[in-house]
Image: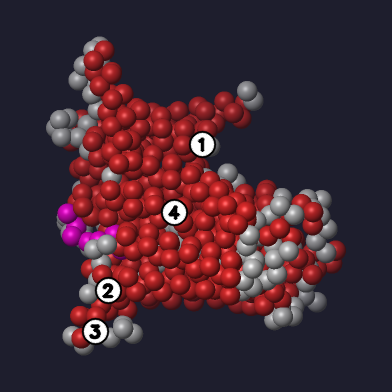
Amino acid sequence: MKLKGYIKYIGVVAFFGGVCGLAACLARLSGQDSQAAAWYSIVPAVLAIVLAFLTHHVLLSLGIAIVVGGLLSSVPPAPLSAAAWLGGLKSAALFVGAAASDRTNLLILSFIPPIFVMVEVTIASGGFHGIILWLLKRVKNRKSAQAATALLGILCFIDDYANAIIVGSMMQPITDRFRVSREKLSFIVDATSAPISGLAVVSTWIAYEVGLFADMSQKLGMGKTGYSMFFDALSFRFYCLLMIVFVFVHIILGRDFGPMKSAEDNAKSEGTNHDNETDSSAHAGSPTGPADGQVSGRAINALLPLGGLILFHMTGLWIDGSGPARLAEGGSPLSWVYWREVISDAEHSHHMLLFSALFGMTIALLCGRLSGALRLSTVRRCFYRGIKRAAMPSVILILAWSLKNCCDSLKAGEFLTTMLADRVSPHWFPPILFLVASVTSFATGTSWGTMAILIPTAIPVAFALDGQTYGLTTMISLGAVLDGAIFGDHCSPISDTTIISSTASSCDLMRHVRTQLPYSLSVAALALLGAYLPSAFGLAPRWSLTLAVLIMLSLFAGYSWYRRRRVP
């Protein structure tokens, strides 16, 4: 092993030992009752972070952390007892079993496969290809090619993986034609994948986020539904919102900086014939291409399933949340408050997710078959690919819920609440939490894993800082965890979406990481200093977002003035 590897391992071990030692010292100094929540209750979550950083395998890391958590639940009182060790292993198995058999969890898991199947069917039937053909008629120059890429990224909001694959593969010939660098293409693809899917009311992310929030609400007695907490957190999703604004502002103004500027200058003068460029045959097996080589573009095959899914889902929530009754009482369907109250009162939101996914999948199948774009053999392959793609996030979800059960059993949230509630200011906790989530996600390469680790441990602390009420600190902290997780995932070279974005755009991975990193860091700094801090100190989120956007525009204007002054 090289010296750099030894230093990495020593540093990680030192970090793990330091965190555990600090927790033990704080517990001892505070005189905390060890029977209530021991200091080692934080070990599973910290261990999951450390192992994920060292191994880059989130499944392995979560699995080991769960086993260790099970052992810690029974071994410390009797470390020399074989029965205690066996009981700990049994506890770990029970954590997983409870997570996999929970009715709500099963509803969430059942939502994922039909969504992935719908995406595969829509791709195979030429739906997204038809949208591309429509866009081609309207793309006239470099700016419109980049804007079309960003708009398509927003339209493909259902899933970040499908977003990256579809947009990168489909837009590459168009951006190449107008000499947009592969680095710029992969950045736009990456910047409109996870940030969009994380914000979308209907996506493969929503069930996961809502599920984590609902568990916290039930555990802490907040009296809020997972959906209402998601909508409350939307106002504080500053990184995702600012990244979307940044993408369009920098496209419109045409001002690049850092390594991206060099890549764009090279593309303008020399084209996109990079060493990593692959010929068209490399994409012959891509799921975004016409199925069986014969499918023509049919945008309706994508628009009807997506529109049907959203309409069915929103209608179901409207009915379930007493929308008609509120309308009869004088509520306005044009009011944001009206829809937030309706969705918050929906008691069967997870059922609506499942039914809407099945409805969207059915519409996609009907469109494909009636248009003649899908053969039965192609449908079977779409089901196989969709279910196969759903397997990995489903396993991650089960392990994430199992780790949450483990942390709950050890009372990690109670320990952190007791240790930090009187030591951290409510004004500083959300910004610090954003940084912690960013570092964790960057190190692990997974936003979902970061959410699974931090929401069960950090939100109880925010709730305590709010005086055991669902207040401002809690709502900002919800947004900070989700946004920090996406920011770190966006920058990480070991992130699946980063890798997929560069691959689909035929861009070298490290070129993609190196060129987009200054952009991501700039937006994260704006989110932290221009939005999270002011909001934590009481500024309304819309004004915090406005402030951050104004700062962004001012920086772009200053950079443009500087560039003009330098041109002779």
The numbered mark at residue 327 is 3
State yes or no: discs 1 and 2 in contact (Cβ < 8 Å).
no
Q: Is residue 527 above or below residue 341?
A: above
Count of picture labels: 4
The numbered mark at residue 97 is none
In the rendered view of the protein, which quadrant contains the C terminus?
A: bottom right
Q: Residue at x 70, y 66 (%)?
A: 295
The numbered mark at residue 112 is 4
Residue 168 location in percent, x, y? 66, 61
Element at label 1: loop
Label 3 vs 4, first from the N-terminus: 4
Q: Is residue 432 above or below residue 321?
A: above
Q: Is residue 437 left or right of residue 153?
A: left
Tell me the distance, in whole angstroms, between the alpha carbons under discs 4 and 2: 23 Å
Q: Which of label 1 and label 2 is nearer to you?
A: 2
Instruction: Please name the predominant secondary structure of the magenta segment in the image.
Output: loop
The amino acid at mark 2 is Ile
Comparing 329 with 470, the one in front is 329
Q: Is residue 299 left or right of residue 389?
A: right
For label 3, the crowd category at 10 Å Cα-Cα, with few meaning under 14, some 14 to 19 and many 20 or more, is few
Q: Which residues are magenta?
A: 221-227
Tell me the distance, in whole angstroms, between the alpha carbons under discs 1 and 4: 22 Å
Residue 128 location in percent, x, y? 62, 68
Q: Is residue 460 left or right of residue 125?
A: left
Q: Is any atom of residue 402 visible in this view?
A: yes
Q: Which of label 1 and label 4 is nearer to you?
A: 4
Comparing 566 with 470, the one in front is 470
For label 1, the crowd category at 10 Å Cα-Cα, with few meaning under 14, some 14 to 19 and many 20 or more, is some
Label 4 vs 2, first from the N-terminus: 4
The numbered mark at residue 319 is 2
Asked if the magenta segment contains residue 162, the reply would be no
